[in-house]
Amino acid sequence: MPIYDWIRVDAGLFHDFHQSWTVALRDALNLGGLPPNYFAS
């Protein structure tokens, strides 16, 4: 199954993936991916 074909995936699985990806992105940005005095929340 292609990762971009979310229409065939259970809604709970999509939301779990989306939330996990968003939190991982935030954590990566806060660990040095942003200029000084900036943070992601």
Image (tube, helix red, strand yellow):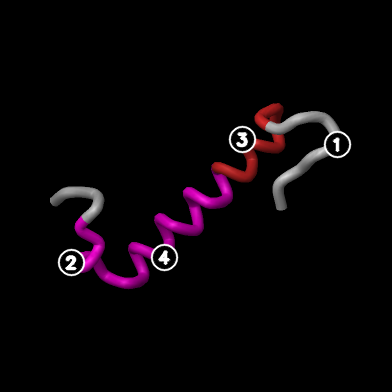
**Percent of width and height locating residue 6:** 25, 62
Q: Which mark is residue 37?
A: 1
| Left or right: 26 in relation to 2 | right
Tell me what residue is drawn at x 61 percent, y 35 percent.
28
Residue 1 falls inside the magenta stretch:
no
Circle 4 packing at 10 Å, graded few (<14), some (14-19), many (20+), is few
Q: Circle 4 sits on which residue? A: 15
Tell which tag, 1 or 4, sits nearer the viewer: 1
Q: Amino acid at mark 2?
A: Arg
Element at label 1: loop
Tell me what residue is drawn at x 85 percent, y 36 percent.
37
Q: Which mark is residue 28?
A: 3
Tell which tag, 1 or 3, sits nearer the viewer: 1
Residue at far front of view = 35
Tell me what residue is drawn at x 17 percent, y 49 percent.
2
Q: Earlier in the sequence, mark 4 or mark 3?
A: 4
Q: Is residue 31 above or below residue 3?
A: above
Q: Amino acid at mark 3?
A: Ala
Q: Circle 2 sits on which residue? A: 8
Range of magenta residues: 5-24
Tell me what residue is drawn at x 76 percent, y 43 percent.
39
Q: Determine the main secondary structure of the stretch shown in magenta.
A: helix
Q: Is residue 8 above or below residue 39?
A: below
| Left or right: 41 in relation to 37 | left
Query: Marks 2/3: CA distance?
Result: 29 Å
| Left or right: 2 in relation to 38 | left
Q: Amino acid at mark 4?
A: His
Circle 1 packing at 10 Å, graded few (<14), some (14-19), many (20+), is few
Query: Marks 1/3: CA distance?
Result: 15 Å
Q: Earlier in the sequence, mark 2 or mark 3?
A: 2
Residue at far bottom of view = 11
